[in-house]
Image (spheres, rainbow, N blue to C red):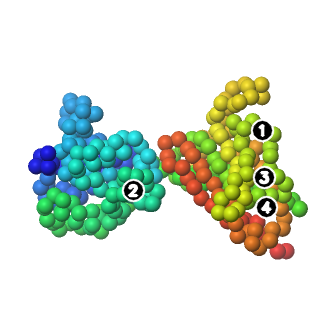
């Protein structure tokens, strides 16, 4: 099998094919077309009239190297992981390539255990290919290629979520609201939001009388800090049909630049807080359709500062 391996296979999702095409072009230029480079979404790789699925499966075993393009959009896609696993199972060298802000630490095994590179490290990627394909790297303008790849990435579909915290002072407490914000360029459909608020800073225990299928509240200890865990579910089946006869969406699709308020999530925080209490952040996790969950923290020190008159 080893003697029949003659190609480089670039695994990617359709939305990021422009990056895969550019990487293919760079590899062909750097190695003067010394070996085939297969990109599944490229018609010249696929060939006219050939079934897409079977053509990919017939080309994967030929790959000496499989470059796996991994981004927050693609890392959890089943087909990406299938192609990577198929390559490993057929003794190909599988090299993860992370980009668009994805870190190696956020990957799952087996990809997490493989030697990989950020896409910005084009020189090392080409050197690695040179070693495995036994072909020297020719002269190529890496600075120009890097700039072109960066420009391509700015036009790619992006879904970036965060949780925004908006407190309003109403002595002796802060009335708090939370908004999902999308800093990407594509609409996002939120599924579930979990917020961890240090219980000690709450004005009173937070226990809204709402169906747990919509809003579940429980106490959770993490890092020796007792927190009130609020889990908010969107477009869910309620457990009490007499209260909610049909599933309903409590958060609309989140468009770029149009924050969506988490209805019914209005905890109250004591005023004033001690200095050490301001040091413990609020944590959150947002799960949405077809993207990796977004996790982050909200620092209280600036948010709960009262302007001096």
Quadrant assignment, res 140: bottom left
Q: Label 1 vs label 2: CA separation?
A: 40 Å
Tell me the residue at 14%/45% (across/down). Answer: 1
Specify which label sits upstream in the sequence, 1 or 3.
Answer: 1
Specify which label sits upstream in the sequence, 3 or 2.
Answer: 2
Q: Nearer the viewer, residue 78 or 173?
A: 78
Specify which label sits upstream in the sequence, 3 or 4.
Answer: 4
Contact (Cβ within 8 Å) of mark 4 with mark 1:
no
Number of residue marks: 4
Residue picked out by circle 4: 200
Between circles 3 and 4, the one closer to the viewer is 4
Q: Label 3 vs label 2: CA separation?
A: 38 Å
Residue picked out by circle 2: 112
User: SS at mark 2?
Assistant: helix
Q: Establish if 83 lies above or below 54.
A: below
Tag 4: Cα neighbours inside 10 Å, few (<14), some, or many (≥20)? some
User: SS at mark 4?
Assistant: helix
Residue picked out by circle 1: 210
User: SS at mark 1?
Assistant: loop
The location of residue 94, given as percent across then percent down, is 28, 53
Contact (Cβ within 8 Å) of mark 1 with mark 3:
no
Specify which label sits upstream in the sequence, 2 or 4.
Answer: 2
Left or right of residue 269, residue 140 in this image: left
């Amino acid at each position: 099998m080893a003697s029949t391996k003659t190609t480089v296979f670039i695994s990617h999702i359709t939305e990021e094919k422009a990056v895969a095409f550019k990487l293919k072009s760079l590899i062909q230029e750097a190695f003067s077309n010394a070996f085939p480079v297969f990109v599944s979404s490229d018609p010249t790789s696929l060939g006219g009239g050939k079934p897409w699925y079977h053509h990919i499966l017939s080309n994967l075993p030929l790959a000496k190297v499989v470059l796996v393009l991994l981004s927050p959009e693609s890392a959890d896609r089943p087909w990406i992981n299938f192609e990577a696993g198929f390559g490993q199972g057929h003794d190909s060298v599988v090299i993860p390539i992370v980009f668009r802000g994805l870190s190696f630490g956020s990957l799952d095994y087996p990809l997490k255990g493989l030697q990989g590179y950020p896409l910005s490290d084009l020189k090392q990627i080409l050197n690695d290919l040179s070693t495995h394909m036994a072909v020297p790297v020719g002269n190529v303008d890496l600075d120009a290629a890097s700039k072109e790849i960066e420009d391509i990435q700015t036009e790619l579909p992006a879904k970036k979520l965060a949780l925004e915290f908006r407190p309003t002072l109403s002595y002796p407490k802060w009335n708090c609201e939370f908004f999902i914000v999308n800093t990407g360029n594509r609409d996002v459909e939120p599924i579930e939001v979990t917020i961890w608020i240090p219980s000690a800073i709450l004005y009173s225990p937070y226990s809204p009388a709402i169906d747990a299928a919509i809003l579940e509240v429980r106490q959770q200890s993490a890092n020796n800090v007792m927190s009130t865990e609020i889990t908010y579910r969107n477009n869910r089946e309620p457990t009490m049909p007499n209260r909610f006869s049909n599933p309903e969406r409590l958060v609309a699709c989140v468009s770029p630049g149009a924050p969506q308020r988490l209805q019914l999530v209005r905890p109250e925080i004591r005023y004033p807080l001690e200095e050490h209490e301001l040091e413990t952040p609020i944590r959150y996790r947002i799960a949405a359709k077809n993207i990796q969950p977004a996790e982050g923290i909200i620092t209280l020190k600036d948010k709960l500062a009262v302007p001096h008159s």
